[in-house]
């Protein structure tokens, strides 16, 4: 009974979180609202279009979304997708001779020529351990030289970390499996007892103790945690069971893929993985097996503002280029570098990158790609991560700070890079999302990232939270600036976004600790991105309110 009680408490926690989230009063479009007029931490999108940009001309801007996949046929995205003007759809010919056959909407670097796609992958640390195992698995430590001993010690440390995480994941799988069994049984019994009736305390109290004692115990503990829950068993099942199943699947994927040193996704891609200069591999399927994350990101940037469907993205003159390089697991440096290069070479003005990891063995390849984008004047917008950590102290890749030994940037940050933390819709002390990474030196700005409602695959819409959502808000604001002021360079846009960010002089809860600290201490700018402020500064910077009509459109609508 004690074990079942623990299981129930875990399920109650899950349902509590879900119910609070589902019942929050935040508007679905809060990220586009105005701090002054709407009293919420949005970026003033609607107000800016109405007061500053109404009637002004603009030119289309290409924003590449490097992610896990984008649904190009979504009702709110299909009219804003970039389409390669030099490629004939589906003819199996590389018409524009860029090396990528039928790259109509972009390219997929984690797929094979045969049409198969990578869905899950290992974590980078797992891959590092897997490579080290080939050298050290059967090694006698006494036979190792000085440098080899250091490497072997590192191998043992890394292997211990992976083994411990694998053990934890296996334990979580067993626990979630038992939770689901218990909850499903309780709901099945409850369905027999109350059918489609609304779930109320009175309904539960009237159940027969002898026959439905377990059901009564379940709901007696559950109902007080559900707040103002107003629904039946179908609604409850949607709240609890779906969430628990997703948690179970997530832990199973850690076991089967994430911490499995024997798994190798490159048997699907079939590239020469050791050749880091290899550019041409993959396939044109930009949606892939799970396009939720990338589709959600794309909608935040550019969901069609001219139709009456779903949501409105931040930018109204954008073409979304989809570049698939991020699996369920850690993205690989080779794929990230090639994705950046592909986007730059095919006309992207801005690249959104809502991904990151703690290890980067081929970091130099990504650094070269970032330098290439800088040379071509392409702005890179990157999510700071969701570990509640200080990025000045903890590794988070990719990033804009380079090892001076490589002679690329020295100690400088790349001028075309902007790192984004996440805001909550709540103000005051709770202004910063509790999961967001931060950094006085390595995070530039904050933007809305909690409970963001956006596009999901196959015509759906869904809420999600993360710096992954904050980054595309900033990419969208950057795209508006580039669209209405096309003479602005990437560095100028970054400077405008940081210098015009809205300050908050009070204290906020530091992610990860809850300690009250000045908001300005969590980023280089000390502020939150705001489109209205950015446009006003762009007007001063350029001296031209219209700014459009002098730039050639790239790609076709």
Image: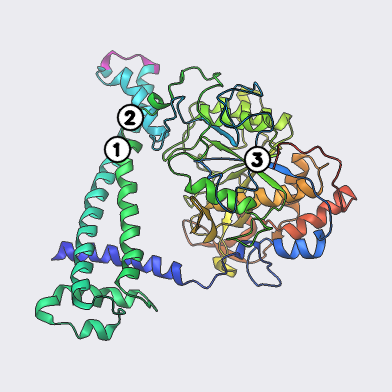
Checking the image for residue 263, the label placed there is 2
Which SS does the magenta portion mostly show?
helix
Q: Secondary structure at mark 1?
A: helix
Q: Quadrant of residue 311?
A: bottom right
Percent of width and height locating residue 41? 63, 65
172 displayed left or right of 70 = left
Disc 3 to disc 1: CB gap under 8 Å: no
Q: Position of residue 340 (x, y in %)?
A: 61, 32
Q: Which residues are magenta?
A: 142-147
Q: Which residue is mark 3?
A: 82
**Nearer to us: label 3 or label 1:** 3
Q: Are marks 2 and 1 in contact (CB under 8 Å)?
A: yes
| Mark 3 Cα shell of 10 Å, populated few (<14), some (14-19), many (≥20) | many
Confirm whether residue 455 shows in the render: yes
- Quadrant of the drawing holding the C terminus: top right
Which residue is rendered at x = 59% and y = 69% of the image? 428
Q: Toward which corner of the image does residue 337 lie, by quadrant?
A: top right
Which residue is label 1 attached to?
A: 256
Upstream in the sequence, badge 2 or badge 1?
1
Could you say whether the residue bearing mark 3 is in a helix, strand or loop? loop
The answer to whether one can see residue 450 in this image is no
Label whose residue precedes the other's in the sequence (3 or 1)? 3
**Which of the two marks, 3 or 2, is nearer to us in this view?**
3
Q: Is residue 157 left or right of residue 291?
A: left
Q: How many marks?
A: 3
Nearest the camera: 198 or 153? 198
Which residue shows up at 52% across the image and 20% down it? 276
Residue name at image x 39 percent, y 35 percent = 121
Is 287 drawn above or below residue 332 in the view shown? below
- Would you say 394 lies left or right of 446 here? left
């Amino acid at each position: 009974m004690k074990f079942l009680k623990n299981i129930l408490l875990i399920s109650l926690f899950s349902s509590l979180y879900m119910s609070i989230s589902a019942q929050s009063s935040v508007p679905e479009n809060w990220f586009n609202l105005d701090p002054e007029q709407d009293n919420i931490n949005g970026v003033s999108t609607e107000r800016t279009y109405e007061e500053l940009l109404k009637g002004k001309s603009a030119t289309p801007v290409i924003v590449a979304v490097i992610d896990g996949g984008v649904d190009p046929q979504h009702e709110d995205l299909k009219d804003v997708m970039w389409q390669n003007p030099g490629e004939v759809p589906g003819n199996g010919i590389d018409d524009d001779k860029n090396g990528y056959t039928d790259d109509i909407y972009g390219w997929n670097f984690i797929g094979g020529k045969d049409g198969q796609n990578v869905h899950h992958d290992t974590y980078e640390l797992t891959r590092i351990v897997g490579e080290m195992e080939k050298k050290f698995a059967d090694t006698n430590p006494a036979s190792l030289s000085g440098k080899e001993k250091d490497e072997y010690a590192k191998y043992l440390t890394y292997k211990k970390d992976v083994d411990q995480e694998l053990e934890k994941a296996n334990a979580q799988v067993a626990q979630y499996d038992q939770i689901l069994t218990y909850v499903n049984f309780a709901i099945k019994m409850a369905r027999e007892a109350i059918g489609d009736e609304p779930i109320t305390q009175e309904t539960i109290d009237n159940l027969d103790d002898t026959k439905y004692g377990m059901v009564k115990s379940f709901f007696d503990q559950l109902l007080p945690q559900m707040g103002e829950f107003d629904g039946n068993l179908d609604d409850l099942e949607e709240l609890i069971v779906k969430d628990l199943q997703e948690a179970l699947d997530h832990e199973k994927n850690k076991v089967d893929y994430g911490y499995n040193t024997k798994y190798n996704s490159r048997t699907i891609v079939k590239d020469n993985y050791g050749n880091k200069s290899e550019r041409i591999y993959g396939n044109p399927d930009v949606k892939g097996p799970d396009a939720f994350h990338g589709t959600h990101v794309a909608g935040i940037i550019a969901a069609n503002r001219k139709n009456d469907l779903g949501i409105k993205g931040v930018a109204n003159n954008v073409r979304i280029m989809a570049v698939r390089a991020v699996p369920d697991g850690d993205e690989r440096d080779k794929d990230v570098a090639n994705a950046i290069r592909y986007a730059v070479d095919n006309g992207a003005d801005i690249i959104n990158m809502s991904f990151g990891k703690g290890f980067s063995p081929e970091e130099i390849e990504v650094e070269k790609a970032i330098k290439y984008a800088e040379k071509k004047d392409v702005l890179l917008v990157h999510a700071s991560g969701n570990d509640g950590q200080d990025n000045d102290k903890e590794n988070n890749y990719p990033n804009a700070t380079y090892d001076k030994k490589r002679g690329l940037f020295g100690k400088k940050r790349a001028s075309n890079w902007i790192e984004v933390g996440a805001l909550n819709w709540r103000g005051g002390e709770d202004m910063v999302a509790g999961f967001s990474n931060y950094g006085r030196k390595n995070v530039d700005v904050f933007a809305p990232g909690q409970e963001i409602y956006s596009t999901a695959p196959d015509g759906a819409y869904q809420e999600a939270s993360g710096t992954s959502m904050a980054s595309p808000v900033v990419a969208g604001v950057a795209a508006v600036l580039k669209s209405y002021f096309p003479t602005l360079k990437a560095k100028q846009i970054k400077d405008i976004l940081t210098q015009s960010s809205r300050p908050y002089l009070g204290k906020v809860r530091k992610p990860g600790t809850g300690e009250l600290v000045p908001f300005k201490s969590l980023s280089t700018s000390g502020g939150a991105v705001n489109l209205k402020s950015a446009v006003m500064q762009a007007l001063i910077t350029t001296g031209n309110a219209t700014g459009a009509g002098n730039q050639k459109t790239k790609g076709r609508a």
